[in-house]
Image (cartoon, rainbow, N blue to C red):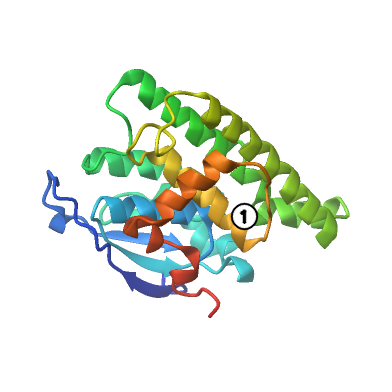
């Protein structure tokens, strides 16, 4: 992919419990600074002490719909993760599962069957039922075909962020499995997806009221270096 700008980044957090020699793994991450789904992969790479060379796919310039990028992800979504010698991996949650299996420590899923199902369910609420509604391709369609102006788009964002996060808040606040994080007291994929949605809400200045459990969990995530270093504003290409 010659047309995308390269940006080197290195994870700074080698887990003390690594079970595999990671020197053999080299990844290329097709990314853009503000994308929620890319943030998830950056956090997971950081937590697992893995590194990737980033290639910037500029969403504002529509590069995700270029012929070059559509060869990597025919759906035109960021991110894609490529491990040398293998086909591109798309879908951030599939990439999280891949990284979890590749490098099990630290675990991003609970040890028990029902716990894993709960975490994956929380992930689905965020990554499948909330985030896809506010992507650029949805905005492009609504603007071109449904007469949406900026105010209508903002109302749409507020509606779907609000619906998703209010339901998640209700679930987290009422479920005894919730701990310091979404599931117990250790970071899981659910926290990564939660923080990813809250990050992009911040970028678009959408405020969802009355979500104290979510607020305290995301604050705890943000205090961890693996999350802080993945913050959109700290990525190459972010506005100064
Ligand atoms: N379900 C996909 C979503 C990928 C996706 O839509 N990413 C957004 C950025 S967060 C994107 O690239 N959108 C481009 C567009 O909508 O045109 C995933 O989790 O990887």
Q: Residue furthest right?
A: 147
- Residue depicted at 33% across the width and 59% down the height: 225
Q: Nearer the viewer, residue 175 or 102?
A: 175
Please tell me whether mark 1 sits on a helix, a strand or a loop: helix
Q: Residue furthest top?
A: 114
Residue 94: percent from the left, percent from the top? 41, 40
Residue 44: percent from the left, percent from the top? 34, 50
Queried on whether the Cβ of the residue with tag 1 lies below 8 angstroms from ligand 1, the answer reads no
Q: Nearer the viewer, residue 232 or 54?
A: 232
Q: Nearer the viewer, residue 73 or 138?
A: 138
- Residue depicted at 47% across the width and 74% down the height: 3
Q: Is residue 15 at least partly visible in the picture? A: yes
Residue 14, image quadrant: bottom left
- Residue depicted at 46% across the width and 52% down the height: 219
Residue 180, image quadrant: top left
- Residue depicted at 44% across the width and 38% down the height: 190
Relative to 216, 46 lies left or right: left
> Compared to 57, does 41 lie above or below?
above
Residue 195: percent from the left, percent from the top? 49, 49
Mark 1: few/some/many CA within 10 Å (<14, 14-19, 20+):
some
Residue 141: percent from the left, percent from the top? 76, 52
Q: Is residue 73 at least partly visible in the picture? A: no
Q: Nearer the viewer, residue 142 or 163?
A: 163
Q: Which quarter of the rendering shows the N terminus?
A: bottom left
Which residue does the numbered mark 1 point to in the structure image?
201
Q: How many marks?
A: 1
């Amino acid at each position: 992919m010659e047309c995308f700008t390269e940006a080197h980044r290195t994870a700074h957090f080698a887990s003390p419990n690594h079970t595999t020699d990671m020197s053999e793994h080299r990844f290329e991450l097709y990314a853009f600074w503000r994308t929620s789904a890319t943030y998830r992969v950056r956090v997971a790479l950081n937590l697992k002490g893995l590194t990737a060379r980033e290639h910037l796919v500029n969403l504002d310039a529509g590069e995700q719909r270029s012929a070059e990028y559509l060869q990597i992800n025919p759906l035109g979504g960021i991110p894609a993760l490529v491990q040398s010698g293998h086909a591109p991996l798309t879908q951030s949650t599939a990439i999280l599962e891949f990284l979890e299996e590749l490098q099990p420590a630290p675990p991003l899923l609970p040890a028990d069957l029902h716990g894993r199902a709960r975490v994956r369910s929380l992930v689905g609420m965020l990554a499948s039922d909330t985030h896809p509604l506010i992507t650029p391709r949805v905005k492009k369609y609504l603007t071109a075909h449904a007469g949406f102006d900026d105010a209508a788009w903002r109302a749409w964002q507020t509606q779907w962020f609000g619906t998703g996060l209010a339901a998640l808040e209700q679930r987290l606040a009422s479920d005894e499995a919730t701990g310091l994080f979404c599931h117990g007291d250790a970071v899981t994929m659910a926290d990564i997806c939660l923080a990813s949605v809250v990050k992009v809400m911040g970028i678009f200045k959408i405020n969802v009221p009355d979500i104290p459990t979510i607020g305290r969990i995301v604050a705890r995530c943000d205090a961890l270096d693996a999350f802080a270093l993945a913050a959109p504003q700290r990525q190459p290409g972010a506005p100064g």
